[in-house]
């Protein structure tokens, strides 16, 4: 029996290259460089591995931005990763990916998140189990229709060559996944999300994931360029800091990547670099009707087809 | 067969009375009154019930303080509440309690948390299943030995009449429970914590829980009185805001009450009123050695017997 060999080095090259392209593009706009933090888990860790965390704090455009690459491996799949795939429980595995969050200073510029990743669970003389996951999504504080349309159109253009139904499915998946059940509120205006993806075979599935990763800069950078110099008031900044609380709630209560990472002994500082720099919580606050803040809730945070 | 009847009204009177005594004592020191928010879940909610949330924001002493009473009931115990008690799964239940968190402005004054609660799962013609839980704990930003000793001594004095081993057990339980695994860090200097407690029979178990609730003001108020006017620098305030991030991480990732409440359809705003008013996250920050900030980590955030 011949088993497939997965070229781990090739996947890793892609992820590190993507990380480099994204940090370069953001640094160029910001005028401040990312700090690069290479890390290695000690050999006796529950989860072994290494990574490269790129972080920019107190930039000119970004209040905080982090782009992390990590490559971890372990002897047993943890619960959060194998819940949809009981056949991999107990197998050795490796997980690799790039994950980023950008929190701009300007409340008129949206926060964004992107992730591309793969899981590979190999066993001697057996076909490897593998899948890809990823996506990107946008979380505005003040919405702009043209930004929403541009973001979703870029996602659709990246996916269409791989299957006519993919964008529709992954857009819906994103709306379902980035949802704060306890608030009955979407995290933002969505984007695309996919996981456990292997239906096109290895080469085409990998190519699809790369198309998503490659599309991210085109999806986000034009929006950031349009908005980072918009005038804003202290009250608008305050609203942004309040709304960032939802981001924290989502990441710590619901986000599978965060929970998987913390459960499995991942590097906490790299996992939690997604958390915003300054966040406010107020009791039972609601926006005044007919304000731009109310429009965020009533219009932008309502799942819709932005390309209709 | 005669079954025991639990006097729900009596327990409720205690909880509402305790809430009132605590908010009165804190208001008197602060000079600002709590806002009282009575709420009722709609009759078609997954979890029915009502409560009284008392909140003080932007006070003179408290930056944010919340004292919540809630009384919820449902037809089926949710997972987070029945994991240690499989025999109650599926039974109708009610849960009642008071929970509070105080976040003072002054970084020299500690944050504190207190909770007293009971769960009662009744079924026709069967002995009710019931237990009490609760405790209080202290989270300083800048430590003071005398405050730590006073807080723990007050807890011990409250428990000793009910059993010589209780304080030792509940102090250890608190250290184990309020622990951030992903940081390998205790949340604060501890206190007491107990759950699933019924070993003294109903009357004495209820009395023990009341002793804990009643001791809270004596445990915390003298510390707050001593510290709320201490001078502090902007850097010390910044350190407090950074450390509050640990509080958020604990409550959203680990706290059983928070997770139970959000899972079971509790009132999100009342559950999340424990979150601090302003919080900061920074990447991979560590205090400079031999500073008061380093002493928090090296000395205060190390489980120890403060009464030795």
Image (spheres, coloured by chain):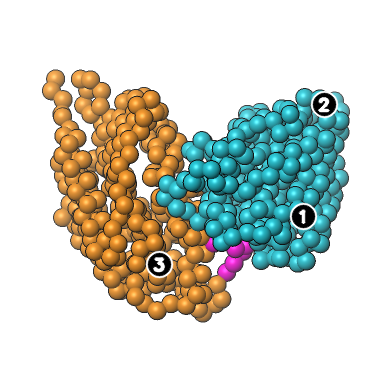
Chain colours: A orange, B cyan
Residue B49 picture location, percent across and down = 70, 52
Q: Secondary structure at mark 3?
A: loop
- Depth check, mark 3 against mark 2: the one in front is 3
Q: Secondary structure at mark 2?
A: loop
Of the image marks 1 and 2, the number of the one nearer the N terminus: 2
Residue beneath disc 2: B163
- Would residue B106 be visible to someone looking at this image? yes
Which one is nearer the viewer's eye here, A65 or A208? A65
Q: Residue at x 40, y 67 (%)?
A: A105
Q: Is circle 1 on the same chain as circle 2?
A: yes
Q: Is circle 1 on the same chain as circle 3?
A: no
Q: Is B250 on the left-hand or right-hand side of B215?
A: left
In the drawing, what numbered circle is on residue B225? 1
Which one is nearer the viewer's eye here, A11 or B71? A11
Residue A43, quarter of the rendered image: top left
Q: Is A167 on the left-hand or right-hand side of B139?
A: left
- Would residue B118 be visible to someone looking at this image? no
Residue B54 picture location, percent across and down = 73, 59
Start and end of the magenta stretch? A280-286
- Magenta stretch secondary structure, dominant: loop
Q: Is residue A31 above or below residue A119?
A: below
Q: Quadrant of the N terminus of chain A?
A: top left
Cα–Cα gap, marks 1 and 2: 31 Å
Residue beneath disc 3: A105
């Amino acid at each position: 029996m011949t088993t497939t060999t997965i070229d781990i080095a090739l996947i890793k090259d892609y992820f590190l290259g993507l990380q480099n392209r994204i940090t370069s593009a953001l640094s160029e706009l910001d005028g401040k460089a990312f700090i690069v933090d290479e890390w290695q888990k000690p050999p006796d860790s529950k989860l072994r591995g290494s990574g490269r965390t790129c972080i920019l704090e107190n930039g000119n455009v970004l209040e905080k931005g982090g782009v992390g690459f990590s490559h971890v491996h372990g002897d047993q799949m943890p619960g959060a990763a194998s819940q949809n795939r009981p056949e991999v429980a107990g197998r050795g595995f490796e997980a690799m990916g790039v994950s980023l969050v950008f929190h701009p200073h300007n409340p008129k510029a949206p926060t964004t998140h992107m992730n591309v990743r793969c899981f590979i669970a190999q066993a001697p003389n057996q076909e490897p189990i593998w899948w890809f996951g990823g996506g990107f999504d946008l979380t505005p504080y003040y919405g702009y229709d043209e930004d929403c349309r541009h973001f979703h159109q870029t996602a659709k253009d990246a996916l269409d060559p791989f299957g006519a139904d993919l964008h529709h499915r992954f857009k819906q998946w994103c709306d379902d996944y980035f949802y704060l059940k306890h608030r009955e509120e979407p995290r933002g205006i969505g984007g695309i999300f996919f996981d456990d993806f292997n239906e096109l075979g290895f080469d085409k599935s990998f190519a699809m994931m790369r198309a998503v990763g490659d599309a991210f800069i085109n999806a986000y950078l034009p929006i950031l360029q349009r908005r980072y110099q918009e005038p804003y008031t202290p009250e608008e900044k305050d609203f942004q800091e309040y709304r960032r609380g939802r981001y924290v709630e989502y990441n710590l209560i619901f986000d599978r990547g965060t929970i998987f990472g913390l459960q499995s002994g991942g590097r906490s500082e790299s996992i939690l670099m997604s958390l915003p720099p300054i966040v406010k919580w107020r009791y039972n606050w609601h926006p005044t009707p007919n304000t731009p803040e109310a429009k965020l809730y009533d219009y932008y945070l309502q799942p819709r087809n932005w390309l209709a």
